[in-house]
Image (tube, helix red, strand yellow):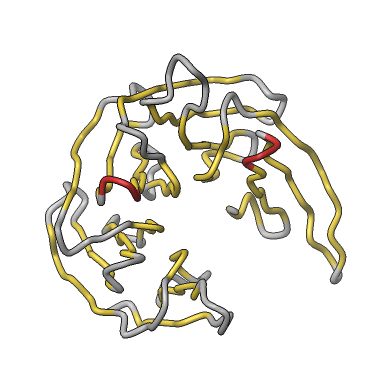
Amino acid sequence: MCLIEDNEVAITMPNQRTVQFLSIRNHSIRETGMVTTIYQCFGLAAVTRGEILVSGRCFDTWSRNKCYWSIIERNGNVKLHHEFVSHYTSYVYAALDMSKSRVYLSVGGSNALHCFGLKDGKQYFVYSSNDLRYPMGVAVDRVDNIYGLGRKSNNIHKLSYDGLTLQIITTGVPYQQTGISFNSTMDHLVITNGSETRKLHFFVNN
């Protein structure tokens, strides 16, 4: 899921290969649109009001060793599409930098974060660490530091704009974390707990 504007969100529906747009007003939810994706979509980020970035894995016979990311307009037109050798992994989460010029993608199966240029698809770096196990979320702060959430390592890797390690933070959250995001004022990281406890955990961003 990602925020499009103050009262509208987009959500992925991988099995249907679609992205649904929802308006949330006065405690009611209304569908405002839907687009079809080329393959199953897991990662999602808003590029502009009229464009979204989607990411996932190519699940057809000829390209099952690849993952992808695309920019899709709200009318369904695919503006950009890039595929990469992935060795049976998938781009499961996506985030954009503040200027919307770079995309960061978490690759759970290979314990890595990938960074690409949004316009040309150029790969800027791959961050991989034995201490980042099965990254299941990625977020960016207001100064373009990157935060990768290790689902199985129970930690957050804070990286610079160029992919250098700044800090490794142990979350202390039991069970398996499944998502990471900033709150609206960008001063707290929010982690979702995928266990039966159904909790959100907040961390101060210093």
If the image is split into quadrants, where does the C terminus sit?
Answer: bottom left
If the image is split into quadrants, where does the N terminus sit?
Answer: bottom right
Tell which residue pokes out farthest to the top in this image. Answer: 62
Percent from the top left, x then y, of residue 116? 30, 34
Percent from the top left, x then y, of residue 169? 23, 76
> At 25% across and 51% down in the image, what residue appears?
111
Percent from the top left, x then y, of residue 167? 16, 70
Give the answer, above or below, for where 16 lies relative to 155.
above
> At 86% across and 53% down in the image, what residue appears?
30
The residue closer to the viewer here, 194 or 124, is 194
The residue closer to the viewer here, 16 or 48, is 16
The residue closer to the viewer here, 201 or 100, is 201
Q: How many marks?
A: 0
Q: Is residue 147 left or right of residue 3?
A: left
> At 49% across and 75% down in the image, what residue appears?
193
> At 63% across and 45% down in the image, what residue appears?
12
The residue closer to the viewer here, 44 or 75, is 44
Q: Is residue 161 left or right of residue 177?
A: left
Residue 67 lies in quadrant: top left
Residue 177 lies in quadrant: bottom left
Q: Is residue 166 left or right of residue 188?
A: left
Tell which residue pokes out farthest to the front in this image. Answer: 61
Residue 23 lies in quadrant: bottom right
Percent from the top left, x then y, of residue 19? 67, 40
Give the answer, above or below, for where 197 lies relative to 75.
below
